Image: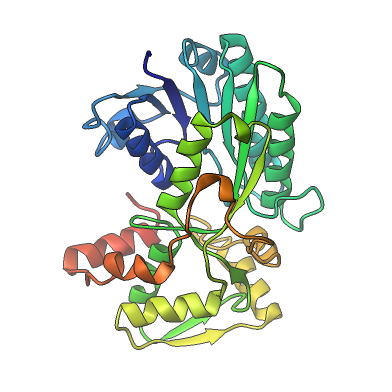
Amino acid sequence: MAKQKVCILGGTGFIGRNIARRLVERGYDVRIITRRRERNKSGLLTLPTLYLSEGDVHNAAVLRQQFEGLDAVINLVGILNAPGRGEKGFERVHVELPRKIVNACREAGVGRLLHMSALHAGMDAPSHYLRTKARGEEVVHSTETADFHVTSFRPSVIFGPDDSFINRFARLLRLTPYFFPLACPSARFQPVYVQDVVTTFAHALEDHNTFGQRYDLCGPTVYTLEELVRYVTKQLRLRRKIIGLNNWMSKMQAACLQLAPGKPFSLDNYRSLQVHSICNSGFPSIFGVTPTKLESVVPNYLRKQPGRNERYSDYRQAARRQ
């Protein structure tokens, strides 16, 4: 049997790298498209059956060319913030790009698409992020045919080494001298481990029973945002006073920080946090996964205290300098 060929869009990110490694381990030929091949090659080019291709995923002709001869495409591309205050930037990434992807898949004869959506994405959701994620999900599922099959995944926040959630708060806590004002402290999350998410993607590629399905993915425990930040503070052995902001102050913080370089927190983020990121049922049994507890993983990658160079790196990342 010939090796299955899969292209991952968004494959240089936290989730994409983990999926790529798993698929290579399982014998797949993996292609990742990136605009900056040299910048993103670290840790990927050592994978024996992975090819890092340079190209613009928003270019329909590039997608059509790159998808030729593939068995499946995985779309992980997404943004939490967009330039300006409107929906245009979100629309481009979460709706227009999925439309280009499904068109390119059909033109190139690709029969399988795995799509990353968002938990509680909805047409009537309060944020641009959640509304455009819902529209993108509808775009890809509306194109299903007898020879083109789609599966969507809707995770809560995803944790693991190099994540952008737990590690983000760790960086901010290290940079804060004593007080830490926290917006939306009562927002609820059900964090899911990245390797559990990876398992669902790898399984779906090989199980026809997942065709046309949409899966909510959550971990075993629900936390408030304040509980998670306090947990990170404890793991870092820091003395910080966490000050939970009320609704008005949370909104004001978002309004101010969305004007800062890198837009670390925005009004759209604030609106997304008004919808609790928790699942209505357990982890989908079809994947055979027992969800991993956050406490069994996070201490292993937070215990290392940063030295001077790492603290300098924290400052650069906080300022969005690479």
Colour scheme? rainbow
Question: Would you say residue 85 is visible in this rendering?
Answer: no
Tell me: 211 left or right of 4. right
Q: Position of residue 61 (x, y in %)?
A: 55, 13
Which is nearer the eye, 185 or 312?
A: 185
* Residue under the image location 22 percent in, 69 percent down: 304
Q: Residue furthest right?
A: 124
* Residue under the image location 73 percent in, 24 percent down: 143
Quadrant for residue 292, please give it.
bottom left
Q: Position of residue 16 (x, y in %)?
A: 42, 40
**Tally of numbered discs:** 0
Question: Would you say residue 264 is visible in this rendering?
Answer: yes
Q: Position of residue 246 (x, y in %)?
A: 66, 83
> Compared with residue 224, is residue 286 higher up or lower down, i.e. above or below?
above
Quadrant for residue 266, please give it.
bottom right
Which is nearer the eye, 54 or 249?
A: 54
Tell me: 116 left or right of 70. right
* Residue under the image location 37 percent in, 43 percent down: 18
Q: Quadrant of the N terminus?
A: top left
> Compared with residue 179, is residue 311 higher up or lower down, i.e. above or below?
above
Which is nearer the eye, 150 or 233?
A: 150
Q: Position of residue 302 (x, y in %)?
A: 30, 69
Tell me: 207 left or right of 239. right
> Compared with residue 247, is residue 178 higher up or lower down, i.e. above or below?
below
